Structures are given as C-alpha cells and as structure tokens.
Image: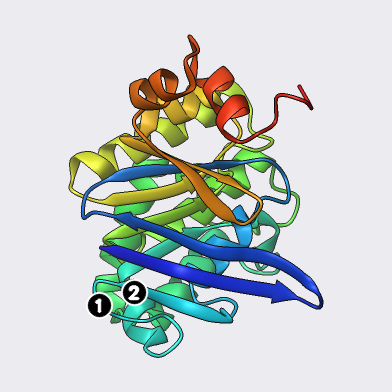
Amino acid sequence: MINYQEVTKSFAKTRVLKGTTFNVAEGESVALLGANGAGKTTALRILCGLIDRDGGSVSIDGYDPAVNPIEARRLIGVVGDREGLYERLSVREYLNYFGGLHGLNRSACASAIDRVVEMLRLEALLDRKTAGFSQGERMKVSLARALLHAPKLLVLDEPTRGLDVPSVRLLRDVLNRYREAGGALLFSSHVMQEVDALADRILIMADGTIVANGTTSELIEQAKVTGLEDAFVRLAGMEDLA
C-alpha cells in the first residue's frame, strides 16, 4: 500500500531525511519509533502530501501524493496536530465541512457523521463549538474527521500525546476496530505499551534513516535484550544517552 523509497529532505542546510525507505502492506499496522529530531514527523508529512520531498519516491496504492494529491488523499486519513480544529465551528459543522471536501453528498455525509459519532461517542459534543475542548475531546474530533471518508490507511503522529487513560483506551479500541475492518495504520509513538498493543511491525528511525525493521520479538532478539524499550534504545544508538 505504501512504497517509500530513498526519500531525502533538507531544511536550509540541515538534512532531515537521508534516504528513508520503508513499505506498509494493505491492512498492516506499522509503528514508527525514533527520538525527537529523528525525522518521523517529516517522513509522515511527506507521505501525506503536506510538504515536498527533495528526492526519492513515495506512492500510496500507486499514487504519488506530490503528483496526484487528490487521489492519494482519498485513500488516507490523517491525525496530526490537534490544534488544527476550527474553533468557531461546532463538531457537526466541522465534520460537514470536511465531508464536502471529500466529495460526499449531503446524504452520504450525514450517514458518515452518524457512523463516526457513534464510534467515538461524540453525541454530547456534536453541537458544541470546539473552542475549549480538552486534549481527549480534540483527539476524538480529529479522529472522526480522519475516519469520515472511510480511508484505507490512517496516519497518526503521536496520537496518545497528552491524553488521559480513558481517552487512550477509546483510541486503542477505535483503532483496533478499524484494523479488524481491514484498514492499515502507520503511526509514530513514544509509548512502548501502545506500540506493542497496536503494531504488527516496528520501524526504528535514527538520524533520518530506518535503522531497524521487524516485529517486537525480532527487534528484541536482534538487540539481544529482554524488552522493546531496551531494544529501541540500543538499535536507535541511544545507549550513551540513557
């Protein structure tokens, strides 16, 4: 589903991605781990067509997000910066707006909103403006928007950051239901428990490249340690910092 090959990206004179390469199969759940500054967010933003790459190739079901952005974006839902809500709109208005952007007619949009509202337990928030929402409430709305058009792939950048335990449990439940329906996940995280619970496979990123790729057990064996956190620290070359 995702084919990400030898991607490079620099900002000014700083090389952030240095030939990043990975793949995600249809229906697969893949976690992207790395220290702050490793290049995770840049890699995800290029995949979603939010910034241009300098070199390499990217495709989602054969569509290059830089060349065919409309076709590529129809296939993906993105949960990134939860500050991006339109605070003058109610949740219903916000979802209606994005349903229109995805080409849903009024009837299809209403059905899609009903589906995500029920899935994310948004009934009490539906006609409230998003200004003043908690982190958990903002996550729910962002995820509802991402799921509205029934994408084949969800891309999430540190989705549990700042969430309380009930919000994390709801997020995990929704993502597991999405996976059971055949959806693919690519997500970054620093929370090893979430990675272990959600990921079929883990990519470890360091200094702009993928330095390890495997299941939890494969990475633990490769690093010759007893747990995922220790494997991450060793394979990412962070032992001197630990």
Q: Quadrant of the C terminus?
A: top right
Q: Is residue 128 visible?
A: no
Residue at 53%, 23% (x, y): give it: 231
- Where is 190 relative to 127, above or below? above
Residue at 67%, 42% (x, y): give it: 135
Q: Quadrant of the N terminus?
A: bottom left
Instruction: Name the residue furthest top.
Output: 226
Question: Badge 2 is on which residue?
Answer: 59
Question: Badge 1 is on which residue?
Answer: 62
Choose top left, top right, bottom left or bottom right for residue 96.
Answer: bottom left
How far is disc 2 from disc 1 in space, using C-alphas? 5 Å
Secondary structure state at the residue bearing disc 2: strand
Locate residue 74 relative to residue 165 in the image: left or right: left
Locate residue 183 relative to residue 101 in the image: left or right: left
- Where is 71 relative to 178, above or below? below
- Where is 194 relative to 73, above or below? above
Q: Tell me where residue 144 appears, x and y as whole percent.
A: 44, 54
Total marks placed: 2
Q: Residues within 10 Å of mark 1 (few under 14, many from 20)?
A: few
Q: Is residue 64 visible?
A: yes
Secondary structure state at the residue bearing disc 1: loop
Q: Amino acid at mark 2?
A: Ser
Residue at 22%, 49% (x, y): give it: 27
Instruction: Name the residue furthest bottom.
Output: 67
Q: Are marks 2 and 1 in contact (CB under 8 Å)?
A: yes
Q: Amino acid at mark 1?
A: Gly
